[in-house]
């Protein structure tokens, strides 16, 4: 019987960046279905609401096909198991990401051993981009044109009206 592999690509996506977009497009080439799972994180005090982050991701991912965008809260591994996903997909930009990601992957495996974490690297041209830096650069008047998709540029402009 052919195997169907569903993967979850989780994150805060506050806002989505070109690095995230690159990961999504690589992910859908490997997995049969990719769920972009947006953390409902009021305690992190995100700039964009959950709905805004999901709307941006839907607009970005819509042309790609086998991607869906969902919200989650609570334990990621529990959510992945409930959605019957075999894989949690995470991007690693630099070695500095690795320690935290390894710790999360091992904890998630301890909680739900049936869900495997798969690490992928984004294109090297995106390796320095993070949502936090994008917001900082934009707030300080720098160009973010090559850092985020167009919809995110528009939304940042509308939200912060600089
Ligand atoms: O890309 P991000 O924004 O750093 O994503 C972090 C995320 C959402 C993957 C992480 O915060 C998470 O998994 N949160 C859910 C709560 C949880 O499961 N915590 C235990 C992690 S081992």
Image (cartoon, rainbow, N blue to C red):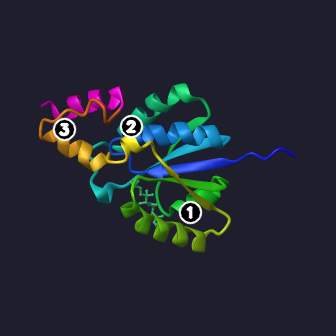
Q: Mark 1 and mark 2: span between their CA atoms?
A: 25 Å
Please state which of the two labelled residues, at mark 3 or mark 1, is closer to the viewer. 3
**Residue drawn at the location 36% of the way across and 39% of the way down:** 17
Indicate left or right for 48 with 31 as reference: left
**Element at label 3:** helix
Q: Residues within 10 Å of mark 2 (few under 14, many from 20)?
A: many
CB atoms of marks 1 and 2 within 8 Å: no
Provide the residue span drawn in magenta.
149-162
Would you place residue 60 above or below residue 119 in this image? above
**Residue drawn at the location 33% of the way across and 42% of the way down:** 15
**Residue drawn at the location 87% of the way across and 46% of the way down:** 1
Q: Earlier in the sequence, mark 3 or mark 1?
A: 1
Name the residue beneath numbered marker 3: 138
Whether the residue under disc 1 has CB within 8 Å of ligand 1: yes
Q: Earlier in the sequence, mark 2 or mark 3?
A: 2
- Depth check: 29 or 162 in front? 29
Q: Which mark is residue 38?
A: none
**Element at label 2:** helix
């Amino acid at each position: 019987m052919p195997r169907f592999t569903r993967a979850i690509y989780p994150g805060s996506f506050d806002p989505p960046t070109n690095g995230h977009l690159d990961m999504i497009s690589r992910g859908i080439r490997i997995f049969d279905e990719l769920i972009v799972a947006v953390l409902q994180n009021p305690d992190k005090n995100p700039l964009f609401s959950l709905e805004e982050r999901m709307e941006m991701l839907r607009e970005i991912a819509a042309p790609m096909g086998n991607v869906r965008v969902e919200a989650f809260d609570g334990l990621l591994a529990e959510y992945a198991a409930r959605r019957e996903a075999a894989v949690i997909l995470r991007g690693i930009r630099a070695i500095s990401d690795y320690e935290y990601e390894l710790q999360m992957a091992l904890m998630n495996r301890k909680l739900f051993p049936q869900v495997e974490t798969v690490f992928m690297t984004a294109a090297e041209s995106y390796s320095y981009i993070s949502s936090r830096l994008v917001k900082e650069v934009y707030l300080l008047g720098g160009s973010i044109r090559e850092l985020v998709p167009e919809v995110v540029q528009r939304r940042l402009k509308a939200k912060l009206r600089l």
